[in-house]
Image (cartoon, helix red, strand yellow):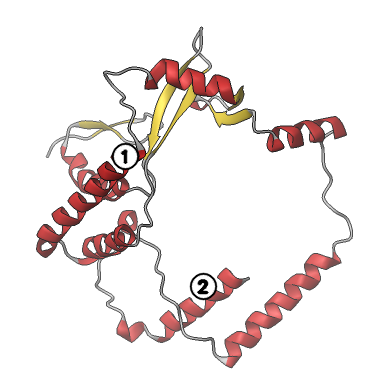
Amino acid sequence: MERFGHDVRLKYWLADNKKNLDPDREYIPELYINSELEPPKASREVKRALNNFEVQLDFEFNKRSIRPGINLLKVQQNALKFLHDSDNFVVLATDKNLGPAIIEKDEYICKAQKDHLSEPSTYRQLTDAEATKIHEANEKELQTIVTENMKWIYGPQNDFFVESLKDVENKKLRTPIFYVLPKIHKTPWKTRPVISTISSVLSIASKWLDYQLQQLIHHVKSYIRDFTGKFSKESRK
């Protein structure tokens, strides 16, 4: 209810302040960052409506005397609880989206080391100090590039970098995470390496670059449209 109330107050405030908004301002969904704007306190009318809604919602919820049934046997419930509480197993997705898999943690770590991390031509083990230094260097490089070119960046793209650099300065970004996906369709099975850069300094640059490339993609004769592999053909004009 707290988040719902926040959204209602924000929309109410924006609706009442449309004259202060620029209707011609460009909106780019791909570069949108959730606003941390805290709207003013709600009027008595809005506050009363929110309170009445919460009371009625609680009443309807508590009125239900029958709890949803569970279609699992007790032994199955116990097995799931055991796996959830255990630190000896890893439940993960599989390559090619072939469903979930479960593997012993030791085997998972061993497989990641054997298939990938022990290969010196591709991977190199870093100390915490080395990793931190590289991470900070990437942050500084992004800040430098954006600052030097900010005069060429307008509207939502400018807002995107301004808000993103705040996360850099406030140390809200994380280091990319390495993990593997088992290729269960292979015999013997192997693993696919994945490096997740979500919420990292690299994701800022890649998100903006992806948006720029999307503007150019329609100028090529053919391209892969999305992850489903559908092939799109367009004739050059």
Picture layout, residue 185 above or below residue 125: above
For badge 1, the amino acid type reads: Ala
Q: As rendered, which of 62 and 145 lies closer to the eye? A: 145
Quadrant hosting residue 134: top left
Q: As rendered, which of 126 and 181 lies closer to the eye? A: 126
Marks 1 and 2: CB-CB under 8 Å?
no
Q: Judge left or right: residue 3 versus residue 82.
A: left
The N terminus is located in which quarter? bottom right
* Secondary structure at numbered mark 2: helix
Q: Please name the residue that numbered disc 2 is placed on.
A: 7
Q: Please name the residue that numbered disc 1 is placed on.
A: 131
Quadrant hosting residue 192: top left
What residue is at 23 percent from the left and 46 percent from the top? 138
Q: Earlier in the sequence, mark 1 or mark 2?
A: 2
Residue 89: assigned label: none
Give the residue furthest to the top.
187
Picture layout, residue 149 above or below residue 17: above
* Secondary structure at numbered mark 1: helix
Q: As rendered, which of 89 and 38 lies closer to the eye? A: 89
Residue 61 percent location from the top left of the image: 79, 65
Residue 124 percent location from the top left of the image: 30, 26
Residue 47 percent location from the top left of the image: 61, 86
Residue 229 percent location from the top left of the image: 37, 29
Q: Judge left or right: residue 223 versus residue 108.
A: left
What residue is at 77 percent from the left and 31 percent from the top? 79
Pointer 1: residues within 10 angstroms few (<14), some, or many (20+)? few
Q: CA distance from mark 1 to mark 2?
A: 39 Å
What residue is at 58 percent from the left and 26 percent from the top? 105
For badge 2, the amino acid type reads: Asp
